[in-house]
Image: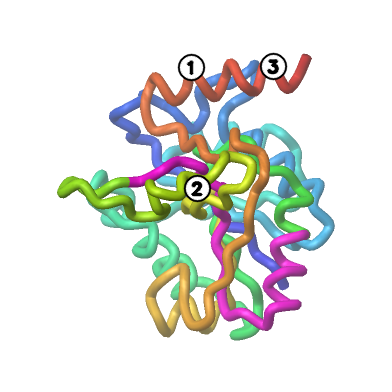
């Protein structure tokens, strides 16, 4: 079984009601739910929330794969880690050790259904234990003490010849259920990186500026 897990709290301080605020005409959480519903490898989608309105909005779309988990109050605070609600959920629900657990973040609306499929194929082909999504970052990085960290300034490469670095974009993570429980972490063992080529996927919506930029880019894609 392959379980997609979306943790969404009601209390977002940066953008009030962020997860159900309309983004290009749809609640933000819809953008991931619709892609997971379309994805043939996903068996169920768990929305883990503390908020009845988020529960009701998530169910209102009528997606057959979606189920709701009402998370404990202690794991729905500003200081609560994502791992805390993952472990809470897995401790209260029975899955096989080898089932695949996919953490999906609602703040990354540019993820598509084939991203999950391709990432899963990569996980299998590379015989990796876990996977994280990334975006390629083609910028020259320096330390505060004046040292180049990812290139030789005496041999400055052209952008088209520069492979850059991979940046964790927060879209999704994959690992076996047993490993998540044992390591108490979304990543473990041999880790592989799935590269999402669309630069828009580097955007995580955490504040108002992120929202404005992401919505403008999504509107452009929809034209």
Residue range (magenta): 118-141
Q: Residues within 10 Å of mark 2 (few under 14, many from 20)?
A: many
Residue 151 seen in this snapshot = yes
Mark toward the start of the polypeptide (3 vs 2): 2
Q: How many marks?
A: 3
Displayed quadrant of residue 29: top right
Image position, residue 181 (x, y; %) = 44, 79
Question: Where does label 1 land, which residue?
Answer: 212
**Which residue occupies 28% across, 54% down?**
80
Q: Residues within 10 Å of mark 1 (few under 14, many from 20)?
A: few
Instruction: Find residue 220 and name its label.
Output: 3
- Say which of 178 and 113 sits in front: 113
**Which residue occupies 52% across, 40% down?**
202
Displayed quadrant of residue 184: bottom left
Q: Are marks 3 and 1 in contact (CB under 8 Å)?
A: no
Q: Quadrant of the N terminus?
A: bottom right
């Amino acid at each position: 079984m392959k379980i997609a897990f979306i943790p969404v709290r009601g209390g977002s301080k940066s953008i009030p009601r962020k997860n159900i605020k309309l983004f290009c005409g749809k609640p933000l959480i819809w953008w991931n739910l619709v892609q997971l519903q379309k994805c043939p490898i996903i068996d169920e989608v768990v929305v883990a929330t503390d908020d009845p309105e988020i529960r009701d909005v998530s169910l209102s779309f009528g997606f057959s794969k979606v189920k709701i988990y009402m998370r404990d109050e202690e794991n729905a605070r500003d200081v609560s880690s994502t791992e805390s609600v993952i472990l809470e959920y897995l401790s209260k629900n029975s899955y096989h050790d080898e089932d695949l657990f996919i953490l999906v973040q609602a703040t990354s609306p540019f993820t598509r259904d084939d991203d999950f499929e391709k990432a899963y194929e990569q996980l299998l082909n590379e015989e990796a234990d876990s996977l994280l999504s990334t975006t390629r970052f083609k910028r020259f990085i320096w330390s505060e003490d004046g040292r180049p960290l990812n290139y030789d300034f005496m041999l400055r490469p052209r952008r088209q010849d520069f492979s850059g670095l991979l940046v964790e974009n927060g879209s999704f993570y994959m690992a076996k259920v047993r490993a998540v429980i044992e390591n108490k972490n979304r990543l473990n063992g041999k880790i592989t990186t799935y590269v999402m080529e669309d630069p828009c996927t580097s955007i995580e919506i955490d504040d108002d500026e992120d929202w404005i930029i992401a919505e403008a880019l999504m509107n452009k894609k929809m034209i």
